[in-house]
Image (spheres, rainbow, N blue to C red):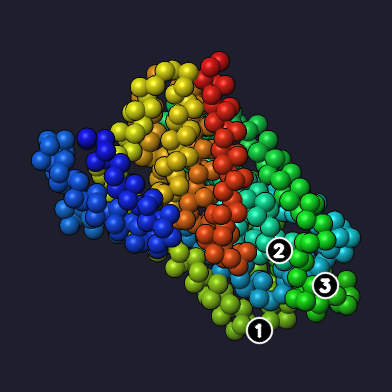
Amino acid sequence: MELILLILPLVVIIFFLVRKRHMLVAGFMGGITAIIISWILVGMGTLETGIKFTDMNELIIGVGVRDMLSRYLTPVMYAATAVMISRAGSIKALIEGLNRLLKGKLAWLAASIVLVQGIATYMAGLGAGNTMVIAPLMLAAVGFIPGVVAAMAVATAVGFTTSPASTETSFTATAAGMEVGAFANLMLPFTIIVFLLAAGLAFYSVYKRGNMVRVGEQEESEFTNMPSKQLWQMVIPALVFLVFVVLGGAFNRLFPIPIIVPIINVLTAAILTIIFCKVTPDDAGRNLIDGSKFILTTLFGVGIFLGFINLIGFLGTFSELASLVGQAPEWLVIFLACVLGFTIAIPSGAFAAGVLTLILPTLSLIPGLTPLAFGLIAISVGLGTQISPVQINVAALSDGFQVSIMDIIKGNMRYVLSFGAAIAVVALVVGIL
């Protein structure tokens, strides 16, 4: 009876999300259910106190909204800069230039862009900011192809769950009892393999479309007859910004102090856009501000939703589910933990590190779990977030490819499930061995 009460708020949220209700409606209904259940559990003697108004305020605003708006400041800046560069024509010029170089070999172009996305995420420790830069480039190159979008999502998920610069890796390494760098090195082979598989998925998805691939010729016709020198000058802002995003961390190691930091990246991109794309400073400023609207709005909504998830965490639901996993036969524990992480991330995957904080402390008490096991669990959580309607990277893909969030989830579903199943199989083998 107690377990049913604990998972009921999650069931309520999933029900409303499946019914395609707004995430805040789903979160609100789940949160109200959690509040009611908290006082029922007080009456049963399970909890010392139920959820009060002050608790609601702290968990929703003080934790949920504040964490989302503070943790994703860099993606906000990068998203705004991507819009500014795009409106200046730099990204369209880059696609035209790549088409000229590759002579129509779009499958190779798509695979290369997915690798750039994965590497950029791995180096930055965050995916959404890179997605805001790279997704419009992919859209202009090949259009909206579900396999390509899913490839970007998978590469992003594995990138931020194994990156030495991410919150997810830091927390997982701590739970595994390892130093972050050593843990990242342990997981690096998995990272490389998944990146290559994701690039292969993008290549195949474009290749099988053949002549059906939409390149957006009407939008790019203005560049068709442009001299190559002028074309590549317009590319400079997009190319420099992309290099700074992907390789900024490596460049900084060459200097005694960090030089390539987010604000310098943004200012450099703005100056180059004004110089090479011939836009006025006023237009660049307006485009930069306008470009932040989508991601700021999304972060605000996701923060409130995450606050409702925190109300469920108050009940101890997630730790209870994790403890159930620990009661399984030893060889099955890692497999079940991966399935649990993947599943929980779907309704509550706004912030992957948040999901890990809900389940890893309990899982770390299970004897016999190796650091590799924790890494596989983290990857499973990351993959699950990519079919979550409240995930910021999913929202970034939605904006970049100009389709709805549910279209992104629908397209990602079978591919993400396939990768998640593969990780679960690896976990099963590791458990048996």
* Residue 257 spot, x, y in % from top left: 58, 51
Q: Earlier in the sequence, mark 1 or mark 3?
A: 3
Image depth: mark 2 or mark 1 in front:
2
Q: Answer whether residue 218 is visible to the viewer in this image.
A: yes
Determine whether 268 is above or below 255 in the image: below
Q: Nearer the viewer, residue 206 or 252?
A: 206
Per the rendering, the mark at residue 143 is 2
Q: Secondary structure at mark 3?
A: helix
Q: Nearer the viewer, residue 185 or 251?
A: 185
* Residue 102 spot, x, y in % from top left: 87, 58
Q: Please tell me which residue is depicted at 43% across the width and 54% down the height of the picture.
A: 18
Determine whether 335 is above or below 140 in the image: above
- Which amino acid, by three-letter code, is at mark 2? Gly
Determine whether 407 is above or below 333 in the image: below
Position of the C terminus, as image quadrant, is top right
- Which amino acid, by three-letter code, is at mark 1? Thr
How far apart are the two marked residues, 3 and 2, measured between alpha carbons? 21 Å
The residue beneath circle 1 is 280
Count every numbered label the image shows and give the total.
Answer: 3
The residue beneath circle 3 is 231
* Residue 150 spot, x, y in % from top left: 63, 50
Q: Nearer the viewer, residue 149 or 373?
A: 149
Q: Answer whether residue 129 is visible to the viewer in this image.
A: no
